[in-house]
Image (tube, helix red, strand yellow):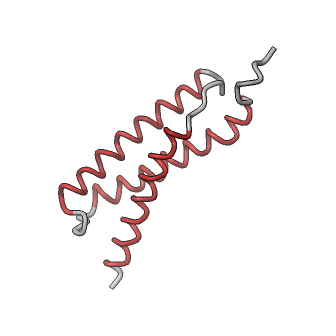
Amino acid sequence: MLNPNLPDPNLLKTVLEPLLEDFQYWFARSLTLLENEDISFLGRDGQADLVSRLQTAQQEVSTAQMLLKVTDGQAGVEMEVLMPWHKLLTECWQVSMRFRRENSV
């Protein structure tokens, strides 16, 4: 019998799997921008810090993806883990928008 306190594996696969894929996609795009452009308003140290945080987040998301896969959807991710990824992604989007705005003239 299934434990009623555990989330439905199908729900986790349906919601969490694509969410983790989205994180990976946007983190990779952000890294591409940061590794190929000089983002002057960040400065070298700020840009290097953002790259480092993105690489760490990518590794964390990869780990969550592996756990979800090897447990056949029995492992989820706590909101306390997801929120820093979301905040990092929002920061990257803001950097990208500002960079494009400043370089569109």
Q: Position of residue 36 (x, y in %)?
A: 28, 59
Query: In which quadrant of the rendered image does the C terminus lie?
Result: bottom left
Name the residue at the left extreme: 44
Q: Nearer the viewer, residue 6 or 102?
A: 6
Which residue lies at the image location 41% right of the left edge and 52% below the top edge?
Answer: 88
Q: Nearer the viewer, residue 81 or 71?
A: 81
Q: Position of residue 76 (x, y in %)?
A: 60, 31
Q: Position of residue 64 (x, y in %)?
A: 51, 32
Q: Using residue 37 as the reference point, say whether residue 1 is left or right of it.
A: right
Q: Nearer the viewer, residue 6 or 10?
A: 6
Q: Is residue 17 above or below residue 97?
A: above
Which residue lies at the image location 75% right of the left edge and 19% below the top edge?
Answer: 3
Q: Quadrant of residue 46?
A: bottom left
Q: Is residue 4 above or below residue 32?
A: above
Name the residue at the bottom extreme: 105
Q: Is residue 56 above or below residue 9?
A: below
Q: Using residue 86 as the reference point, say whether residue 76 is left or right of it.
A: right
Query: In which quadrant of the rendered image does the N terminus lie?
Result: top right
Name the residue at the top extreme: 1
Q: Position of residue 37 (x, y in %)?
A: 27, 63
Which residue lies at the image location 35% right of the left edge and 55% below the top edge?
Answer: 32
Which residue lies at the image location 18% right of the left edge and 58% below the top edge?
Answer: 44
